[in-house]
Amino acid sequence: MTHPLRLHPDRLFPSDGRTRDIARALHAGVKDLPIVSPHGHTDPAWFARNEAFSDPASLLIVPDHYVFRMLYSQGVPLEALGVPTVDGSATETDPRKIWNIFAANYHLFRGTPSRMWLDWVFAEAFAIDVRLEPATADLYFDTIDAALKIPEFRPRALFDRFGIELIATTESPLDPLDHHAAIRASDWNGRVVTAYRPDPVVDPETPGFASNVRRFGETAGEDVGSYAGYLAAHRFHRARFRDAGATSTDHGHPSASTADLTPAEAEALYARVMAQPTAAEAELFRAQMLTEMAAMSVEDGMVMQLHPAVSRSHNTSVLARFGRDKGGDIPLPGEFVRALKPLLDRFGNDPRLTLILFTLDEDTYSRELAPLAGHYPSLRLGPPWWFHDSPEGMRRFRKRATETAGFYNTVGFNDDTRAFLSIPARHDVARRMDCAFLAKLVAEHRLEEDEAHEVARALAYDLVKQAYRL
C-alpha cells in the first residue's frame, strides 16, 4: 500500500481561520517573486559546464550533510551512503542501494525542515505524487534518474525554471574562479556571482595556513613576508572577486571577536602567527583581521557577513575518515556586544559599511543582536541560520528581533545551501513563515494589512537586494 504525497496549500499558515485568510492573501502577493540567493555553497561548475546530474543518490544524498547526519545518528554508516573517504578507501558506489537505504529510513525526517524541503523537491520538481517509503523507493529512483537525463533538468534549465534571479557561491581567495569566468563567457543569462571567503588565509589554525598564505601572496604578486604585503594581497584578491561579480565577503570565525591593534602590534602578531602561534594569538589575529576586512569593505563597498560560533567537525573519528563538512558541526554560545566593540568603535557609524550578523545562539537575538542592529547604522541581522533555518526557528527569530530591530534592519532570507534543488523549497518556507507572522500582527490590529503587504515583499525580495548591493 502506498500513501499520497500532497503539499497542502495552507502549510505553515495559522490554524485560526481569519488569520489564515490574511496569510493566504499576503503569500499570494510574494510567492512568485524571483528568488535572490545572496549567500550559499552551490558549485559554480554546475552552471559553467551545464552537465547532467549523474543520479538521484549523488544529487540528493551523498553531498547533503543535512540528510546523512540524521541517518548516521541512527546507526547508518556513512560508507553505506557513498560518502567519500579521505584516503580513498571503498564506500558504496551503487546509487540504487544508497537510495534504498535512504527510503527505508525516510521516516526519520518526520517533523524536520529537511522533510519539508525534500517533499517539495519530489512533488514540485519531479511531479511524484506518492510518499517516499520502501515500497516506492524504486519508483522514486527510476523517475528521478530518468528526469536527470533530459535537458530540462540540467543546472541552467533548473535555475531558470525555479525563477532564480541570482545565486552567490562562496570561494576561497586561493580559487582561480575559472568556473565564474566560463559562466560570464557563455551565452547563458543566468546571474551566478562569487563571494570572498578568506578563512584559509586568515585563520592560523587552518591546516596548511602558512603555505596557503605563501600561495595567496604569489598569485597576488605581493610579498607576504610583511603584514603590509599580506594586506595588499587581500586587496588584490578582493578586486579579482569583484571582477567576478562579488558584492560580499564571508567570515566563518570561531567567535565574533574583533581587535584594533596598532600597526606595530599587528606586524609583530603577523610574524608570530606565520611561525607557531598559540591559540590566543590565533584568536587575536582573526579578531584583528575582521577589523581589517571592515576597513577594506569601507574602501571597496563589499558587504561583510559574519558566521561565528560553531564547533567544526566535533566528531574527530568522522573528521579523520571523511574530512570536513560531514554533519559533525555543533553550535556554540555566542557573544557580540563586547566582541564587536573594537570594530564598531571604528566603523559602526560609517554608512559605507554593511556587516550582516548571523548566529546559532538564539539567546542573543533579543539580548544582543536586535539591540545592536537597532542602533548601529552599519549592522544588519542575517536570517535564521543552519540549525535554525526551520519554521520554528524563523518564528522565534521574528518574535525576538522585530520589536527592537524592526523588519528593515534585517536582510530578508538566504538559503546558505549546497542542495541546489531545495533552494525554491527553502524560500517558500521563509515566505510562508513571514506571511504567517505578519498575518498575526494584522489580526491583532498591530499592523495595517496594506503595510503587511509592503513588508512581505520587502522580506521576500527588496531587502536582500538592498543589503547585498545587488
Image (cartoon, rainbow, N blue to C red):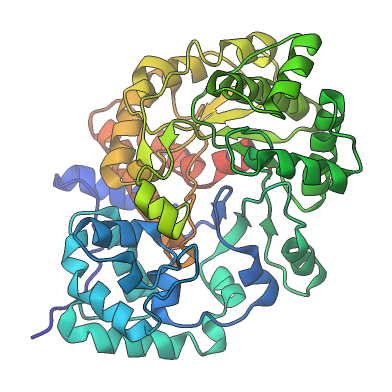
Give the quarter of the figure containing the N terminus: bottom left
Figure quadrant of residue 389: top left
Q: How many marks?
A: 0
Residue nearer the viewer, 187 or 182? 182
Figure quadrant of residue 310: top left
Residue plotted at (72% across, 35% down) = 302
Tell me residue 125's x, y (percent).
Answer: 41, 75
Residue nearer the viewer, 78 or 431? 78
Figure quadrant of residue 361: top left
Give the quarter of the figure containing the C terminus: top right
Residue plotted at (44% across, 75% down) = 58
When the figure is inspected, residue 242 is found, relative to residue 113, above or below; the finding is: above
When the figure is inspected, residue 455 is found, relative to residue 62, above or below; the finding is: above
Residue plotted at (28% across, 66% down) = 77
Residue nearer the viewer, 229 or 211? 211
Left or right of 373, for residue 170: right
Is residue 272 visible to the viewer in this orientation of the structure? yes
Left or right of 328, for residue 407: right
Is residue 352 visible to the viewer in this orientation of the structure? no
Residue plotted at (30% across, 83% down) = 97
In the displayed orientation, state which residue is furthest to the left.
1
Tell me residue 141's x, y (percent).
Answer: 33, 85
Tell me residue 319's x, y (percent).
Answer: 42, 51
Tell me residue 212's x, y (percent).
Answer: 72, 44
Residue nearer the viewer, 262 or 238? 262
